[in-house]
Image (tube, helix red, strand yellow):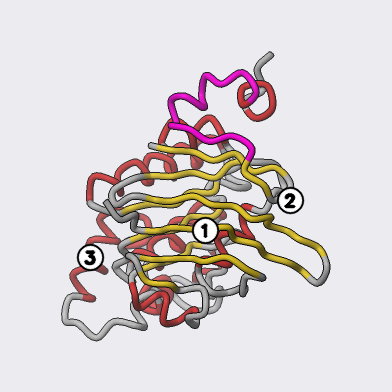
């Protein structure tokens, strides 16, 4: 079986500093795969490189069997790969609905309004306040909007970068539950998440990054009981 996403020997540099050091991993269709690690491990850089926002120093990125590491970011979205970035990056002076419709900018089909309704079903608070300026939303509501905007491109693969960062424990649970709902709907997910316990509980497979290198990999269940992972990332002795 061909993986939906394959990252092969990826290196990413900022000047002379290697942020990602020859990592390889794959995401199969229908899976949730997570990257965990401390700040500076290279997780966000990896996602930004996959989505075309950063060019790799070397290595290959294949999406559905085709190389995309030289493809412009907007064309990568059109291929079916969406990125909900760290920090949400919503447009604060635009309305909720305007933000969501921007997520569909690359589409030419007639089902955009149907997908808008489905996004409102997934996030009812967005429906209730669709005309409100996005910048007036709380952090959790902005995260819902960022995820909804990414979903509006109708992605085959959705990349989520730190969706629970800075949220209350209650809102974090809502976001994690939403991620869990997306998989049965047919969305393949690559997740970067600071809450390693939640991420590994969701994930089919996980990869632990340290200083730009994959140091441990396995199923989500296996990593949850891995002694090194428990000590370093789950706060257990």
- With respect to residue 180, does 51 lie above or below? below
The x, y position of residue 54, in whole percent, is: 62, 73
User: What's the residue at 67%, 65% (across, down)?
Assistant: 12
| Magenta stretch bounds | 215-228
Please identify, in this view, whether the residue under mark 1 or under mark 3 is nearer the observer.
1
| Contact between labelled residues 3 and 1, with CB atoms less than 8 Å apart | no
The x, y position of residue 2, in whole percent, is: 30, 55
Label 1 crowding class (10 Å Cα cut-off): few <14, some 14-19, many 20+?
some
- With respect to residue 224, does 35 lie above or below? below
Q: Whole-Å distance between the Cαs marked 1 and 3?
A: 38 Å
Residue 218 is covered by the magenta coloring: yes
User: What's the residue at 29%, 61% (across, down)?
Assistant: 119
**Label placed on residue 8:** 1
Q: Which residue is mark 3?
A: 117
Q: Which residue is mark 2?
A: 40
Work out whether mark 2 precedes mark 3 in sequence or the reverse, and give the earlier one: 2
Please identify, in this view, whether the residue under mark 2 or under mark 1 is nearer the observer.
1
Front residue of 15 and 199: 15
Label 3 crowding class (10 Å Cα cut-off): few <14, some 14-19, many 20+?
few
Q: Whole-Å distance between the Cαs marked 2 and 1?
A: 20 Å
User: What's the residue at 59%, 41% (across, down)?
Assistant: 36
**Label placed on residue 168:** none
- Would residue 99 be found to the left or right of residue 2 on screen? right
- Would residue 9 be found to the left or right of residue 95 on screen? right
């Amino acid at each position: 079986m061909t993986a939906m996403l394959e990252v092969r020997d990826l290196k990413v540099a900022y000047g002379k500093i290697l942020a990602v050091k020859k990592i390889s991993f794959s995401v199969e269709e229908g899976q949730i795969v997570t990257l965990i690690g401390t700040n500076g491990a290279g997780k966000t850089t990896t996602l930004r490189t996959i989505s075309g926002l950063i060019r790799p120093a070397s290595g290959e990125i294949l999406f559905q069997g085709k190389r995309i590491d030289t493809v412009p970011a907007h064309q990568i979205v059109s291929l079916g790969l969406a990125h909900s970035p760290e920090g949400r990056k919503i447009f604060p002076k635009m309305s909720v609905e305007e933000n969501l419709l921007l997520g569909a900018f690359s589409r030419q089909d007639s089902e955009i309004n149907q997908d808008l309704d489905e996004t409102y079903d997934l996030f009812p608070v967005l429906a209730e306040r669709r005309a409100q300026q996005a910048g007036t939303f709380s952090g959790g509501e902005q995260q819902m909007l960022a995820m909804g905007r990414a979903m509006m491109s109708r992605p085959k693969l959705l990349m989520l970068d730190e969706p629970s960062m800075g949220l209350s424990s209650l809102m974090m649970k809502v976001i994690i539950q939403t991620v869990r709902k997306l998989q049965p709907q047919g969305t393949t997910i690559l997740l970067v998440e600071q809450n390693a316990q939640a991420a590994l509980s969701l994930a089919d497979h996980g990869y632990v990054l340290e200083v730009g290198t994959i140091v441990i990999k396995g199923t989500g269940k296996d990593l949850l009981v891995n002694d090194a992972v428990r000590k370093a990332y789950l706060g257990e002795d």
